[in-house]
């Protein structure tokens, strides 16, 4: 039997002072899926992430989490508690604290009981942090001040912090922007590893990254769904090539359709 979608957006419309940034958008995400959301500037990608995490409320449509919970009108913190984590472009780590301390704080934030803040960490919690450190490749930098990490490492630390909150869905906005090629590659591998257990939506402009790591891609244009499918299918689509022509060089998927 097919499991129900972890996230379903039906006919979502978002208006800003009468301007429709998103118009009747549909998006269905299966459990354990790594989905890339692409499209030219202003297509409505970030607004869709804002809708899913509750930062922006749609004027029409519905967002359903895990097949049963209507999160369309829920508050941001309620949506976060249900298990939808959002990572913004700018890292929100504590730069003067160590890598390990950042992870500890994040794990404790999951708990609502403030009293546990100074409680001794149980062995199981230490294990989880160790596991997370290895997964994000920072096991040799636990005592480093987070502010001293490279740009890529900061992003991984933040992803690790999110994972300790055990989200069902991670929403990432251009995670590889500003990363070196090597860091980008490692991030792609990390996302695949995460998607074994969780679902991820990535808004991305780096088409080489998308080509290398995406299985299913959703293309938005002018607030609407333009095309959905494998990167090959998307690249072969004339309408997709058309909307990208003459837009951003790095996002020019039409290059490989020639
Ligand atoms: N708070 C807002 N108020 C008014 N207009 C907005 C607001 N947020 C976004 N928009 C507009 O909505 C449209 C979609 O924006 P959005 O940021 O979702 O696009 P995007 O696909 O993420 O673009 P980019 O790739 O450039 O980040 C744009 O025309 C943008 O100017």
Image: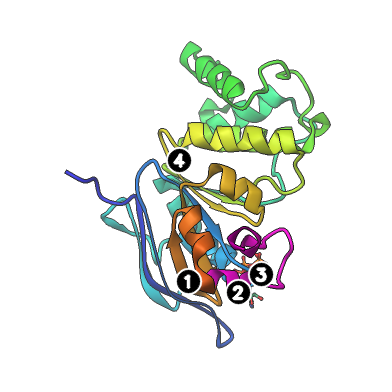
The residue beneath circle 1 is 226
Crowd rating for badge 4 (residues with CA inside 10 Å; few <14, some 14–19, many 20+): many
Q: Which residues are magenta?
A: 240-258
Circles 4, 2 touching at the beta carbon (< 8 Å): no
Inter-mark Cα distance, 3 to 1: 14 Å
Taking the image in four quarters, ligand 1 sits in the one at: bottom right
Inter-mark Cα distance, 4 to 1: 29 Å
Inter-mark Cα distance, 4 to 2: 34 Å
**Does the beta carbon at disc 1 come under 8 Å from ligand 1?**
no
The residue beneath circle 4 is 167
Which secondary structure lies at badge 4?
Answer: loop
Instruction: Please tell me whether mark 4 or mark 1 is closer to you in this view.
Output: 1
Residue at the (42%, 33%) spot, across then down: 196
Q: Nearer the viewer, residue 37 or 103?
A: 37
Horizontal side, residue 144 vs residue 54: left or right: right
Inter-mark Cα distance, 4 to 3: 28 Å
Of the numbered discs in the image, which one, if any, rests on residue 243? 2
177 vs 236: above or below: above
Inter-mark Cα distance, 2 to 3: 10 Å
Quadrant placement of the N terminus: top left
120 vs 16: above or below: above
Query: Does label 2 or label 1 sit earlier along the sequence?
Result: 1
Question: Does the magenta-highlighted stretch encompass residue 252?
Answer: yes
Which secondary structure lies at badge 1?
Answer: strand
Instruction: Please tell me whether mark 4 or mark 2 is closer to you in this view.
Output: 2
**Where is residue 183 drawn, in percent x and y?**
71, 35
The residue beneath circle 3 is 41
**Does the beta carbon at disc 3 come under 8 Å from ligand 1?**
yes
Horizontal side, residue 142 vs residue 126: left or right: right
Q: Nearer the viewer, residue 9 or 237?
A: 237
Query: Does label 3 or label 1 sit earlier along the sequence?
Result: 3
Query: Does label 2 or label 3 sit earlier along the sequence?
Result: 3
């Amino acid at each position: 039997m097919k499991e129900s979608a972890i996230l379903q957006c039906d006919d979502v419309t978002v208006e800003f002072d009468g301007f429709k940034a998103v118009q009747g958008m549909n998006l269905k995400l299966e459990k354990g899926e790594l989905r890339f959301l692409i499209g030219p500037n202003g297509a409505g990608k970030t607004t869709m992430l804002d809708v899913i995490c509750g930062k922006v409320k749609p004027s029409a449509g519905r967002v359903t989490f895990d097949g049963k919970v209507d999160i369309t009108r829920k508050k941001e913190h309620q949506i976060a508690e249900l298990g939808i984590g959002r990572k913004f472009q700018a890292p929100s780590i504590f730069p003067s604290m160590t890598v390990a301390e950042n992870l500890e704080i994040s794990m404790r934030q999951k708990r609502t009981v403030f009293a546990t803040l100074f409680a001794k960490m149980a062995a199981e919690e230490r294990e989880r942090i160790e596991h997370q450190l290895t997964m994000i490749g920072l096991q040799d930098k636990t005592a480093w001040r987070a502010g001293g990490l490279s740009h890529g490492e900061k992003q991984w630390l933040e992803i690790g912090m999110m994972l300790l909150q055990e989200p069902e869905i991670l929403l990432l906005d251009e995670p590889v922007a500003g990363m070196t090629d090597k860091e980008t590659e490692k991030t792609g591998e990390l996302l695949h590893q995460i998607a074994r257990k969780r679902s991820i939506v990535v808004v991305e402009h780096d088409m080489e990254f998308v080509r290398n790591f995406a299985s299913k891609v959703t293309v938005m244009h002018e607030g609407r769904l333009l095309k959905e499918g494998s990167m090959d299918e998307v690249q072969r689509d004339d309408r997709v090539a058309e909307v990208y022509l003459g837009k951003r060089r790095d996002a020019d998927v039409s290059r490989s359709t020639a």
